Amino acid sequence: MKWWVSMPKIELHAHLNGSIRDSTLLELARVLGEKGVIVFSDVEHVIMKICFYSDDRSLGEVFKLFDLIHILTTDHKTLTRITKEVVEDFASENVVYLELRTTPKKNDSIGMSKHSYMEAVVEGLRAVTTVDIDFDSHKFNTQDSLNSIAMNDACDRTKRKRIHVRLLLSIDRRETTEAAIETVKLALEMRDLGVVGIDLSGNPVVGEWKTFLPALKFAQKQGLYITLHCGEVPNCQEVQLMLDFLPQRIGHAIFFEEEEWRQLKTSKIPVEICLTSNIKTESISSIDIHHFVDLYNAKHPLVLCTDDAGVFSTSLSNEYKLASTAFGLGKREMFELARNGIEFIFAGDEVKQDLVETFDSAAKKLN
Ligand code: 5GP
């Protein structure tokens, strides 16, 4: 097994509906086509593009794609299924801690509230059987299963793979202040079910910071952790306001001016880096000029992430391989980069300690 697959990894920026398996997306489209809900031939080529050609598409096109994915996935049963599959997929490539984010959605026509949406997601966590999962209490659900995924090289502390999962609720930039506050209240209600924080995401050219600020302030006051999609498009004023807010982490950090780089480095706010996503959405023209290099050399807190493993046809292992090749970093440096991620997770000390032990154990086998 290649080292980038076998070594333990930490995933902190993964959107549930963006991480859906290609095969599941295609199957869902076929079923909805047969039921006459959609015209399969209309969407087939779009899905096939995601699944098999994986070509680049602008950030705007990606958001149109999400609208299509949501038509296919937003019912309770499907959410449960894709949550289970996404967790099992990450665990199969030795992700030992996953923070999965999703936007709770309301759809009266199928009796879905934001609350029932999240219940379906949590049901998906409960349905995980092929790996041991902890998602709420640092106690592993260790159901035995015949189709248990085989033990791996780097983290053989137990026979079965094990993964800690925590949830972040996303506020979509299309939402109103009231809707954003409703999401924060839901996160507070679901703290015992593994919800640890709030994310701000969605099309970066839509919505204004002042709309989300009351909800984010409320979340911050209540002790929820916050991560913001920041600087995905040029918008100096918003980047400044976001950095002043002092979130626990930010995602992407692409269109920063000199002053914002300086402020970021001083603040030491960890950055979730999504290489493939940035290249495929053409937000960055070439990997050689990616800001990873400058931040890494400045020893700024960084973590490699997938963003949308399904939509961008990637995996966390692939992101590690890509960074290693593109930036000339060896196995040990990549291992340290992965291990450093422990510091930036939103779960508590017990989980951190468990991850330290997992990485220590894997370090002994690193040669
Ligand atoms: P979901 O929240 O439905 O589980 O995951 C998909 C949603 O995540 C998208 O509709 C979008 O709001 C958000 N998302 C996924 N990828 C990106 C990204 O690269 N940038 C931003 N700003 N939002 C994203």
Image (cartoon, grey):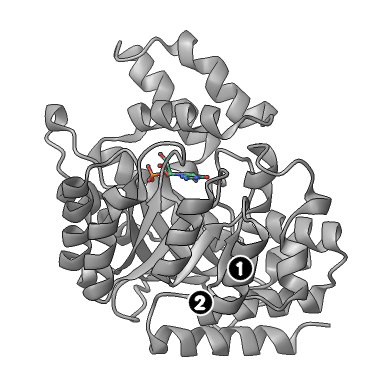
Identified at 34% across, 73% down, the residue is 141
Locate residue 284: give its quadrant: top right
| Residue hosting label 2 | 344
The amino acid type found where label 2 is placed reads: Phe
| Quarter of the rendering occupied by the N terminus | bottom right
Farthest right residue? 328
Mark before the other along the chain sequence, 2 or 1: 1
The answer to whether residue 166 is visible is yes
Identity of the residue drawn at 24% across and 52% down: 118
* CB within 8 Å, label 2 to label 1: yes
Q: Which residue is nearer to you in this view: 150 or 305? A: 305
Quarter-of-image position of residue 273: bottom right
From the viewer's perspective, is residue 134 above or below residue 175? below
Position of residue 334 measured from the top left corner of the image (x, y, whole percent): 75, 72
Residue 14 visible, this angle: no
- Classify mark 1: residues with Cα within 10 Å, few (<14), some (14-19) or many (20+): many
Relative to 250, 31 lies left or right: left
Number of residue marks = 2
Q: Please state the horizontal and vertical placement of residue 298, each as a whole percent of the image.
A: 73, 76
Q: Secondary structure at mark 1?
A: strand
Q: Which of the 4 image quarters holds residue 263? A: bottom right
> Which residue corresponds to mark 1?
303
Identify the residue shown where x is 62% and y is 45%: 277
Quadrant of the picture in which ligand 1 is shown:
top left
